[in-house]
Amino acid sequence: MSKAIIKLTYKQVIDAASGTDFEKNVLFASYQEFLLKSQAYNPDNRLKTFSEMKNNDGRANSLHYKLSFAIGYFIEMLKNKIPALSDNLGNSITFEVPKFELIESDTTTMAAHKVALNYITGELALLNTFGEYMVLGTCDSEETFTIKLQDGLSISSYRETTSTKLNGHKVLAN
């Protein structure tokens, strides 16, 4: 019986220090798109950073959404597997929704470009916790896995479950 139905979010920060091909591709494609799309919020070219653009024109916040199209191909190549996150046996964790976030950038140097990908899982059954470990299961099977809480990993949705007895059998209710 599960204690709760949860969703996990894993935040992968990508910047100039990132080393995998996936991270480099995301960084380069999103930076090129930033240079193109940011012109709408910087018509006289006096602003250099994303922060300056947001402070000057709140519509610059739409760059989070607009830049996400430039990396769609790379996200598809993941086949819904979260990179850099696995269970205790090394198996990939599956995500349902990716969310792109532009943390900061600068039109004069790609070295200042910093983005994040937030991978949100589907619903998981939280079965138990042991210190910093969670025993989880998918809501539609009896298969379980264990994952360690770590930097960048968060429970982003939590709904307690209760059980009642019906004709002598336990029934879960949300």
Image (cartoon, helix red, strand yellow):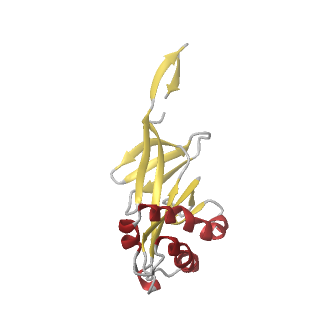
Q: From where the camera sits, is residue 14 visible?
A: no
The spot of residue 111 in percent (x, y) is 43, 85
Q: Which residue appears at 44% of the width and 86% of the height?
A: 108
- Residue 10 left/right relative to 139: left
The spot of residue 51 in percent (x, y) is 37, 71
In the rendered view, tell whether residue 19 sits above or below residue 41: below
The residue lying toward the viewer, choosing from 134 and 47, is 47
In the rendered view, tell whether residue 110 sits above or below residue 5: below
Q: Which residue appears at 42% of the width and 41% of the height?
A: 158
The spot of residue 58 in percent (x, y) is 41, 61
Q: Which residue appears at 52% of the width and 71% of the height?
A: 40
The residue lying toward the viewer, choosing from 171 and 29, is 29
Q: Which residue lies furthest to the left in this view?
A: 131
Question: Which quadrant of the figure has residue 92?
Answer: bottom right
Q: What is the number of callouts on the image?
A: 0
Q: Which residue appears at 55% of the width and 72% of the height?
A: 37
- Residue 81 left/right relative to 103: right
Q: From where the camera sits, is residue 73 visible?
A: yes
Question: Which quadrant of the figure has residue 67?
Answer: bottom right
Q: Which residue lies furthest to the top in this view?
A: 167
Q: Which residue lies furthest to the front in this view?
A: 44
The residue lying toward the viewer, choosing from 76 and 151, is 76
In the rendered view, tell whether residue 57 sits above or below residue 18: above
In the rendered view, tell whether residue 149 sits above or below residue 21: above
